[in-house]
Image (cartoon, rainbow, N blue to C red):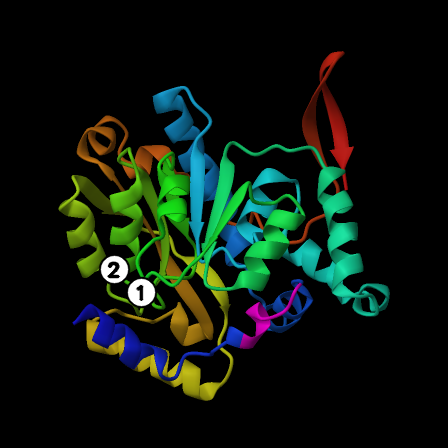
Amino acid sequence: MLRMDFSRINRSKAIFHNIYASDDPRAYFSILGDLDYMIPDVAEPVVRQILAAKASATGLKPVVLDVGCSYGINAAVHRFPLTFGGLRHRYARREMRAISSETLVSLDRNFYAAWPDVGLARFIGLDVSVQAISYAKSVGLLEQGIVADLEKEALSTDSARILRSVDVIMSTGCIGYVTEKTFSEILDATEKQPWIISFVLRMFPFESLAEAFAKRGLVTERLTGATFIQRRFRDAEEFESCLASLAALGVDATGLESEGLLHADLILSRPEADARATPLEDVVTVASGRGRPIGPRYVHVESNEGLHVALEP
């Protein structure tokens, strides 16, 4: 039933398959950027808090599997002091548009290597796009990458081996394209009971995934009182279709999707003991206005000389 619902809902949802067929992310940033795509940026502060809680619980740097990772953008904005918006402007430069993919990959490898890695986790990626995974690995955003469509095929032995060490599974937009079938394949390959961070568009029901997770001993919590903007609607058809899907689910779109923006919920699934020890509301604090353009601000900087104040542009 869930897969049928996803298929119906997706009929009028914007399709972006072509942007993942390129050897580099220029088309990805151009097309999604034109729709004010922002979920990597608005999700990152929350992901960082959850990964910090996971690391605190285990004492280890977690291994994250990004499902539907595309070109490794979630890894980029988590590991480095970068944003989707900033990267979009980088690739929009005429000089960047004129070069070959091979040259761009070489430049991007050096670009990311030049930034301090402030990440709390190591990243593995899963995507159906050979080109996107190849890029993300080549420029150093992902340690390992898996190319597979787990809705249609089983994990290979080599891919299953890569997933054994996964501590956290995350997705910021793939639910609706993938179902519990993909996540079941992943969970069957892991040695641990991972935490699952899901940013799910509100028009997609989550019950079947929660049931699949519960069978594996995971409880699911949904953050209340906050939503996360993904992007603007592509056109009137997508807008009206989304509102109709929400109405069919009994979800009120007033002040959210009705204002022309796709909104996602944060859902966290993890072992019951972990959820009891630190409820989701104790793990995550949402700071409104974090992503808005602002002037220079004072920040603390830790250096060899100790903690001091700096003005950050």
Query: Which picture quadrant has residue 264?
Result: bottom left
Q: Position of residue 244 (x, y in %)?
A: 29, 82
Residue at 59% across, 39% down: 79
Q: Tell me the crowding category of disc 1: few under 14, some 14 to 19, or many 20 or more residues within 10 angstroms, Cα based.
A: some
Q: Which residue is identified by label 2?
A: 181
Above or below, comparing residue 210 to residue 313 in the picture = below
Asked whether the viewer can see residue 287, the reply is no
Return the residue nearer the eye: 16 or 283.
16
Q: Position of residue 83 (x, y in %)?
A: 63, 50
Region in magenta: 18-23
Q: Amino acid at mark 2?
A: Lys
Residue at 22% across, 76% down: 4
Left or right of 146? Residue 276 is left
Above or below, comparing residue 208 to residue 143 in the picture = below
Q: Position of residue 293 (x, y in %)?
A: 67, 53
Asked whether the viewer can see residue 50, the reply is yes
- 19 part of magenta stretch: yes
- Quick check: marks 2 and 1 in contact, CB under 8 Å? yes
